Amino acid sequence: MSKSVIVIGGGIIGLCSAYYLQKEGHEVTVIDQSSMDYGASYVNAGYLSPSHIIPLAAPGVMKKGLKWMFNPESPLFIKPRMDADFLRWVWAFNKSCSSKNVNRNISAIKDIAILGRDLYAEIRKTEKFNFQLEQKGLLMICQTEKMLNEELSVANIAKKEGLPVKEVSFEALKRLQPNTKLQAKGAVLYECDAHTTPQVFMEELKMYLKSNGVIFHKNEKVQHLSIKDGKISSIETKSHTYIADEFVLAAGSWSKLLSKKLGIKLLLEAGKGYRIDSERDFGITMPAILAEAKVAITPMQGYTRFAGTMEIAGINHTINRVRIEAIAKATQLYYPNVILTPQEKNNAACGLRPVTPDGMPYIGKSSNCKNLTIATGHAMMGWSMGPSTGKLVSEIISDTKPSLDLSTYYPDRKF
């Protein structure tokens, strides 16, 4: 049965939800508080990464976070603040940094990431899109024996999960990247991963949705939600009131603020990431993560992207120049000939990724609101999981059997 659906949020999760909902014959409206041309969905590394099977909340991460708190260049930076929601999140995050959390969620992360990767290919073929989609794999490049051993331990877990992965010697690494200079001990290659140019996919998807009847309302901030009999009866922006049968909350880091208006307490923090783009040809042809520095490098359509850091410091788009420099310096340590210019660094941008305490997204219905489907909290995996989350959202609203077990992603789960 066709329903009217309002999707709150026009990032990768919201647009993919709109895509699959309209495919099922629903009447879809997307509302976003921005101009829908910037943010995490546009500045991410473009990875489709089944390899990223370890959630952010893993053993030792909180200890590292406390150590890195005093280093403004660190890969993970948690800015302390006296805020009740933040303190609850920190408590839950610390509790989740366990082997139990990792072991419980590995398969769920792998399954939704593989589905997402395959759905990108399906969308590209079905809609005749032209966005970049290459499955060259992903290199985890290491400069120390210690880090290489750590990455090999993760690789062994990935192998047990059926993912194709192998160790790469420095000599083999040079053969894989013959046109650039590298300083490394070795690497791990995940052959299951692919990469894209996010901006191109987002523009193609928006054009497709508009031409297929999806209505967009940009620069419209949801200010009020009316509840009646356990359902959202309407939502209000500064200038409009909207009604629908079903609502999807896919507002990224802002989802926590909106869920509060419904009496739903989502533990969620904004994790800021940065990117630097360069149109110069450095001879880098394969996506890579610089393991010690946690910097991602992606050869995209027309440029190379250097991205990284996780800065948990509230909702803001302030560019921290120290962290931009950290990305540039780390890159040069691994690729000595890659010296990013002041202009390239000045043009850096950031995006906010919604982070849950256990590193798993929220996907599903909350018991507090019958006609609301929540889809947020994907942290660094939002791009990988975009289509798969959108498909799950559509299946929930269409009352069809979900492609994956949703229990792991339940929004009302306890920490």
Image (spheres, rainbow, N blue to C red):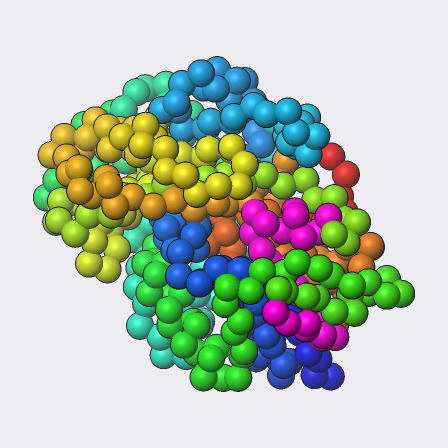
Residue 237 percent location from the top left of the image: 63, 65
**As drawn, which residue projects farthest toward the right?**
229
Identity of the residue drawn at 89% across and 65% down: 229
**Residue 20 drawn in magenta:** no
Residue 61 percent location from the top left of the image: 53, 24
Identity of the residue drawn at 41% across and 76% down: 207
Image quarter in which the N terminus is found: bottom right
Pick whichever, 228 or 391, lies toward us: 228
Residue 337 percent location from the top left of the image: 11, 34
| Position of 131 relative to 369 (above/below) | below
Which of the 4 image quarters holds residue 343? top left
372 left or right of 282 in image: right
189 left or right of 367 in image: left
| Position of 234 relative to 356 (above/below) | below
One can see residue 364 in this view = yes
| Position of 342 relative to 43 (above/below) | above
Which of the 4 image quarters holds residue 360? top right
348 left or right of 278 in image: right
**As drawn, which residue projects farthest toward the front?**
239
**Residue 250 drawn in magenta:** yes
Q: Provide the residue span drawn in magenta.
A: 239-260
Residue 262 percent location from the top left of the image: 77, 54
Looking at the image, how many numbered discs can be counted on the residues? 0
| Position of 70 relative to 56 (above/below) | above
Image quarter in which the C terminus is found: top right
Pick whichever, 349 or 159, lies toward us: 349
Identity of the residue drawn at 58% across and 56% down: 251
One can see residue 101 in this view = no
Pick whichever, 33 or 307, lies toward us: 33
Identity of the residue drawn at 70% across and 30% down: 84
